[in-house]
Every structure is written in C-alpha cells, then in structure tokens.
Image (cartoon, rainbow, N blue to C red):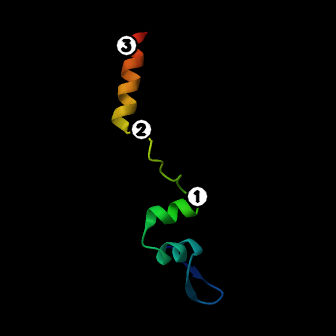
C-alpha cells in the first residue's frame, strides 16, 4: 500500500493501487487481472527446457 500526505486536507491518503492490492490476497490473479503480468499457459517451457533447446541449437552450428 502506498501512502501519501495531502497537505490541503492535512491527512494521509491511500493510493488507488494500495486499495486494489489490499482488496485481493491472490496477488497472481490480481496482477493478471490488471495486466501487470500475462496469464500462465500450461504448455509454457521451463527455464531448464529453454536452456536445453538453446544448447542443442548451438551444438548444431
């Protein structure tokens, strides 16, 4: 949550992002819903699989 101080009213104000984050405990779903991250796909490669593909490609050259 992000707080800022509003000098005109003399109070701390919670940012809209802070309100959104406080409204949902599942941060992955929240980040996906608001477009901060892409939804995961079941057929995505792991880092190890991707590195293996790169290594195999480099062996062919």
Is mark 2 in CB contact (under 8 Å) with mark 1?
Answer: no
The C terminus lies in quadrant: top left
Point out the tag, 2 or 3, that comes first from the N-terminus.
2
Compute the Cα span from label 1 to label 3.
Answer: 38 Å
Compute the Cα span from label 2 to label 1.
Answer: 21 Å
Is mark 1 in CB contact (under 8 Å) with mark 3?
Answer: no
Q: Nearer the viewer, residue 18 or 39?
A: 39
Nearer the observer: mark 2 or 1; the answer is 2
Point out the tag, 2 or 1, that comes first from the N-terminus.
1
Q: Does 38 sit above or below residue 46?
A: below
Q: Nearer the viewer, residue 41 or 19?
A: 41
Outermost residue, top side: 61
Outermost residue, front side: 42
Residue at (56, 63) in percent of width and height: 33
Q: Which residue is mark 3?
A: 59
Residue at (45, 61) in percent of width and height: 28
Residue at (41, 24) in percent of width and height: 54
Label number found at residue 45: 2
Q: Quadrant of residue 45?
A: top left
Q: Which residue is mark 1?
A: 35
- Whole-percent x, y for residue 41 in the image: 48, 48
- Whole-percent x, y for residue 20 in the image: 54, 74
- 8 displayed left or right of 31: right
Where disc 3 sits, the SS reads helix
Q: Does 58 sit above or below residue 37?
A: above
Residue at (53, 59) in percent of width and height: 32
Outermost residue, right side: 8
Compute the Cα span from label 2 to label 3.
Answer: 20 Å
- Whole-percent x, y for residue 59 in the image: 37, 13
Crowding at dot 2, Cα within 10 Å, few <14 / some 14-19 / many 20+, comes out as few
Crowding at dot 1, Cα within 10 Å, few <14 / some 14-19 / many 20+, comes out as few
């Amino acid at each position: 949550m992000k707080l800022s101080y509003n000098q005109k009213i003399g109070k701390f104000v919670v940012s809209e992002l802070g309100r959104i984050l406080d409204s949902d405990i599942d941060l992955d779903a929240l980040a996906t819903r608001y477009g901060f991250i892409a939804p995961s796909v079941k057929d995505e490669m792991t880092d190890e699989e991707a590195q293996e593909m790169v290594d195999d490609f480099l062996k062919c050259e």
